[in-house]
Amino acid sequence: MLLCFMWLLGFCSSSTGVPVSSTNGAASASGNASTLSIVDLFPAANQTSEVGALTSESEVSNVSSETLEELQLDLPLDEGDIILTEDRNAVSRVWKNAVVPYIISPEMAHRTADIEKAFKMITSSTCVRFKDRTDEANYLYIRTSKGCASYIGCLGGSQSVYFADACSVGNICHELVHALGLHHEHNRQDRDLYISVKWTHIAPDQKKNFEIKRGDLLDLPYDLGSIMHYGTSYFSIDGSPTIVSKDSRRRIGQRSHLSKLDIKKLNALYHCSK
């Protein structure tokens, strides 16, 4: 069993590898996920979600778009939308040669266009590529569920990524970035320099989602505008802000695009040569 597991991991790469050249191009999908992130299908009254559309910056502040309440999986969840296997901001097991094989399950075929849009959000600015799985041992298996979720990084074998119809293109991209190896931005160990967490406004059973995670910051700064950052009212008990920026001029979080720093972090993680 151990030898088999080590054989699978051999198809994932350490983050300390040879630079990968970056070429732009369209992406296609197949595979499984290594970290789980999920969209609640039954948002509170002050929340909104769009199916098959980008979530605007104004909407994301009140959308707990990476939270799972009814996914029937016997897996430990952390940070609201992640099935954790590593307690780091960026994991060391990346996809070999920055290529992510994938399979889209038949019941997700109607979301193929949205999934491909999410792929392109990543491939247009990084050296990461998504390809239809043929016989690769490690791959993402994109499947339906009652939420939107992903594991973190390449774990080996078939990794499920879960998308509900309520997941927007931006939500899908968020989960794919998790699968590539990045955690939530607001959990970085330097976050208290940039945001204030309003603990009294957070639902008691969701406070773990705001705990600091120690890990590799890739020598890049904190990003309030990251697609991986929570919005201002995620997991609020009454709609009051749960996160407040210390720079009042900056909007917190969005689900419409990769920020410049998101791009730099993925390119650093995958040693992309530009």
Image (cartoon, helix red, strand yellow):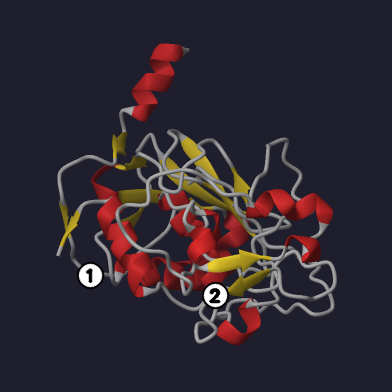
- Quarter-of-image position of residue 257: bottom left
Relative side of 209 to 27, left or right:
right
The residue lying toward the viewer, choosing from 99 and 240, is 240
172 up-or-down from 216: above or below: below
Of badges 2 and 1, nearer the viewer stands 2
Q: Earlier in the sequence, mark 2 or mark 1?
A: 1
Relative side of 224 to 210, left or right:
left
Residue 168 position in % (x across, y down): 59, 73
Say few, some or many: other residues with alpha carbon within 10 Å of mark 2 (under 14 / 14 to 19 / 20 or more).
Answer: few
Dot 2: element: loop
Which residue is at a point 82% across and 53% down the rendered structure image? 204
> Could one spot residue 56 in this view of the protein?
no
- Which of the numbered marks, if any, corresponds to residue 90? none
Q: Which residue is mark 2?
A: 246
Which residue is at a point 45% across and 69% down the rendered structure image? 118
Residue 255 position in % (x across, y down): 53, 74
